[in-house]
Image (spheres, rainbow, N blue to C red):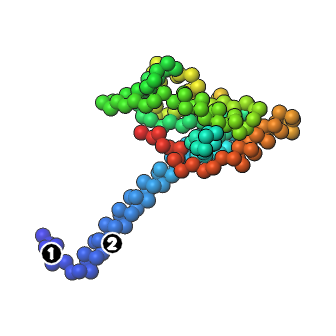
Amino acid sequence: MNDLSQLPPTAWVLIACAAALGFGAALAWRWYGHYRARKALRVAVTGGAADHLIDTLVPDGMGGGFHIDFLLLTTRGVVVIDLRDVTGNIFGGDQMAQWTVMDGPHRFTFTNPQSALYDRIAAVKAVAGDVPVEGRIVFTRRGRFPKGLPKWTLMLDGLRAEFPTTEFTAPSESDARLREAWQRLKDTVKPSYMGHMRHMR
């Protein structure tokens, strides 16, 4: 059996370098995995939109702003997306103040997000003007609603079905108004550094 204490200093340096390289490679691989997951999620949310904005602050009319995860420009109008990434069975309803998540032995609650969604829609309407503005609370595939989806709530896989990809036609009056409203939004909103994965569990 070799006595490790007899190894020369250069051998210890090489062992330390190899360990550091292995640790760095593991961190890099983990970062790359997270990067690919975030990119795929972004494409899943925005793929059907003619244009989109991510992580923005929309003025609330009182000197502050509402963080919005995604703003989508669709042929139906502007869509406000509140993205939620939670794991487990989700139990929520329109009249429930708290929604509950059960993930095996783990249980937690969060505030019913519908009211906050209405506030964000109102803030976007105040900027966009007389164009349709809708909102959806979108949950990723890691969550499930065994008792059914509450109002204005979608699973990620259902987003594209509700807002299918459709090209804008050659400028009609309604399309032109929508484009003008979208430009106002782009000129008004500011970047938000809260990050659209702030609700990840």
Residue 170 at x, y percent in the picture: 86, 39
Q: Nearer the viewer, residue 66 or 63?
A: 63
* Left or right side of 108 for 140: right
Query: Quick one: label 2, few (<14), some, or many (20+) residues within 10 Å?
Result: few
Quarter-of-image position of residue 175: top right
Residue 159 can be seen, yes or no: no
| Quadrant of image for the C terminus | top left
The local secondary structure at tag 2 comes to helix
Q: Tell which of 45 and 176 is nearer to you.
A: 176
Residue 52: quarter of image: top right
Question: Is 117 on the left-hand or right-hand side of 23?
Answer: right
Residue 153 position in % (x across, y down): 56, 27
- The percent position of residue 27, horizontal first and vertical second, equals 40, 58
Relative vertical location of residue 15 with respect to residue 113 in this rendering, above or below? below
- 84 to 112, vertically: above or below: below
Identified at 25% across, 75% down, the residue is 12
Tell me whether circle 1 and circle 2 mark residues in contact (CB < 8 Å): no
- Judge whether residue 2 can be spotted in this image: yes
Q: Secondary structure at mark 1?
A: helix
Nearer-N-terminus badge (1/2): 1
Q: Amino acid at mark 1?
A: Ser
38 up-or-down from 83: above or below: below
Mark 2 — residue?
17
Q: Position of residue 58 (x, y in %)?
A: 63, 42
Give the residue at x 73% y 33%. 77
Front residue of 197/170: it is 197
Q: Which residue is mark 1?
A: 5
How far, Cα to Cα, is label 1 from label 2? Answer: 18 Å
User: What residue sits 43% from the left and 31% below the top?
Assistant: 110
